């Protein structure tokens, strides 16, 4: 029977801080990152029955076989599933499944299943990230009620989290390459099982805290810069969006949009939270991109604990599958999605007093080894499950890191899905970083006028 590890906090503390900066962990606690914990904060040991092995360093060397840009697409290709979970036997594995996973098994009993493979703890990061995390553990803290940070750089800010909001910051500041470029498609799955191309895009992402010369003193606080250009369909070709995200809640997101029809760049303050994502034809909300995208301040974040779960993992093979094979009518094709058993932090989000959001309650499942959001369940105002997200992580040894881009959001009430940033049949490259002036509205305007 699965064990739920409840996280203990100091007497009198609360799960979400309000007010002044919250202290980091003690030097003695941080020392565990060299002994019982991995350098990013996961438990080094395996579980009792051996179904989760010990962490031994992850994948850090190039892998042979086919590549999608810098993504090897055939890791563990010779392995067979240990077992399958379907609508008929799901009760046997109930404690390992999220509400959303159960709902999909029940909703599509003839087509949706989990192929569960041996667990591989492939998570790794560059040594400079490990060094930063060891320092972050004792110097990084939250401010503004948990919605801003200080004292961090280039790695997991809270490898030994005490609060739910710290786990979510770990996700937002997850390990990335300093600069990447890729192309992707957004696909809308309609209620009748048909699929529609929303957009095809090319995108540049830059992550300033992971610059080799970044320090807590020199870093501006902007943790992600992106700029993309729409390629298809023809009536949207040429549209652009620039976003700059910051750890400072007073200036959490800046965004600019270029619309071909208007031939001008304008500020885009609504590209956030529960605004329907126009890049995906409105089939998901902006903050559902990549599992979670943007500021944390609409919610209060409660740390439920850690538990063993079946989650999508090591899905390089899914990324490498042709798009026509990767999708089934109402969900991802189970033949190409790898599920494994891992320990997950569970964080519950409820709308904060005085705030609003279309999804009043969410539950996030965050991997202990990578701090990636792999599953999310969203509930309506009556507490009924409404939405669920599956994220398909993949290993990039050249960084090294485990990354996520594709997130699939299921609207269980409308019987639709939105496949966001599908990399299938596209490309993904780690590239030299650009001048940060590239990620501005002025740069988009200048390029558009040529």
Image (cartoon, helix red, strand yellow):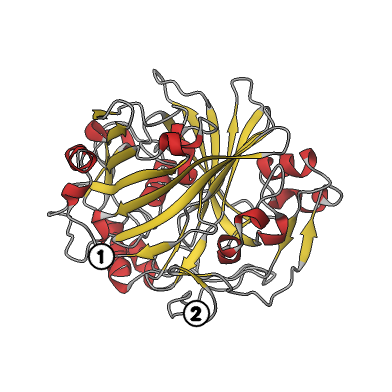
Label 1 sits on residue: 432
Which is more toward the observer, 195 or 105? 195
Q: Is residue 266 left or right of residue 378?
A: left
- Would residue 218 appear left or right of 183 to someone viewing this image? left
Task: List x then y, in percent, for residue 100.
Answer: 66, 41
- What is the x, y in percent for residue 440? 20, 41
Q: Secondary structure at mark 1?
A: loop
* Callout 2 secondary element: loop
Nearest the eye: 316 or 10: 316
Report the quarter where the C terminus lies.
top left
Distance from Cα at disc 2 to Cα at disc 1: 22 Å
Residue under numbered circle 2: 63
Q: Is residue 317 visible?
A: yes
Q: Is residue 29 above or below residue 328?
A: below
In this view, 34 is above or below 277: below
Looking at the image, which is closer to me, 158 or 72? 72
Residue 132 picture quarter: bottom left
Locate residue 171 relative to residue 374 in the image: left or right: left
Residue 95, x across and y down, in percent: 72, 49
Point out the tag, 2 or 1, that comes first from the N-terminus. Answer: 2
At 34% from the left and 68% from the top, the residue drawn is 31
The image quadrant of residue 414 is top right
Residue 155: tell me if it is visible.
no
């Amino acid at each position: 029977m699965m064990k739920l590890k409840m996280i203990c906090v100091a007497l009198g503390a609360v799960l979400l801080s309000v007010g002044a900066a919250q202290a980091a962990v003690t030097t003695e606690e941080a020392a565990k990152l060299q002994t019982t914990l991995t350098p990013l904060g996961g438990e080094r040991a395996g579980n009792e029955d051996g179904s989760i092995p010990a962490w031994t360093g992850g994948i850090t060397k190039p892998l042979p076989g086919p590549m999608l840009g810098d993504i090897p697409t055939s890791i563990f290709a010779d392995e067979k599933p240990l077992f399958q979970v379907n609508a008929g036997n799901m009760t046997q594995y109930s404690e390992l499944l999220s509400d959303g996973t159960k709902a999909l098994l029940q909703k599509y009993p003839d087509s949706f299943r989990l192929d569960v493979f041996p667990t591989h703890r492939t998570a790794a990061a560059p040594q400079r990230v490990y060094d930063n995390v060891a320092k972050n553990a004792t110097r990084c803290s939250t401010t503004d009620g948990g919605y801003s940070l200080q004292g961090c750089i280039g790695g997991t800010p809270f490898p030994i989290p005490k609060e739910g909001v710290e786990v979510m910051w770990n996700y937002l500041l997850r390990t990335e390459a300093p600069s990447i470029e890729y192309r992707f498609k957004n696909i809308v799955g309609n209620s009748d099982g048909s699929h529609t191309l929303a957009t095809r895009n090319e995108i540049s992402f830059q992550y300033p805290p992971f610059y080799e010369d970044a320090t807590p003193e020199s870093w501006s606080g902007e943790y992600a810069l992106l700029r993309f250009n729409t390629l298809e369909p023809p009536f949207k070709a040429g549209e652009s969006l620039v976003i700059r995200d910051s750890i400072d809640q007073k200036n959490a997101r800046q965004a600019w949009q270029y619309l071909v029809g208007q031939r001008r760049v304008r500020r885009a303050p609504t590209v956030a939270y529960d605004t329907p994502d126009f890049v995906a034809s409105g089939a998901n909300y902006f903050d559902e991109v990549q599992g979670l995208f943007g500021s944390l301040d609409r919610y209060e974040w409660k740390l439920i604990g850690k538990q063993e779960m079946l989650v999508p993992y090591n899905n390089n093979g899914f990324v490498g599958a042709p798009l026509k094979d990767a999708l089934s009518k109402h969900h991802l094709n189970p033949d190409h999605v790898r599920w494994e058993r891992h320990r997950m932090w569970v964080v519950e989000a409820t709308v904060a007093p005085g705030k609003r959001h279309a999804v009043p309650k969410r539950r996030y499942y965050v991997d202990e080894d990578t701090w990636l959001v792999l599953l999310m369940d969203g509930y309506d105002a009556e507490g009924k499950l409404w939405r669920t997200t599956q994220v398909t992580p993949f290993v990039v040894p050249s960084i090294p890191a485990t990354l996520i881009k594709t997130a699939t959001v299921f609207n269980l009430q409308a019987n639709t899905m939105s496949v966001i940033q599908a990399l299938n049949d596209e490309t993904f490259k780690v590239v030299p970083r650009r001048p940060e002036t590239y990620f501005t509205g002025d740069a988009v305007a200048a390029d558009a006028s040529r």
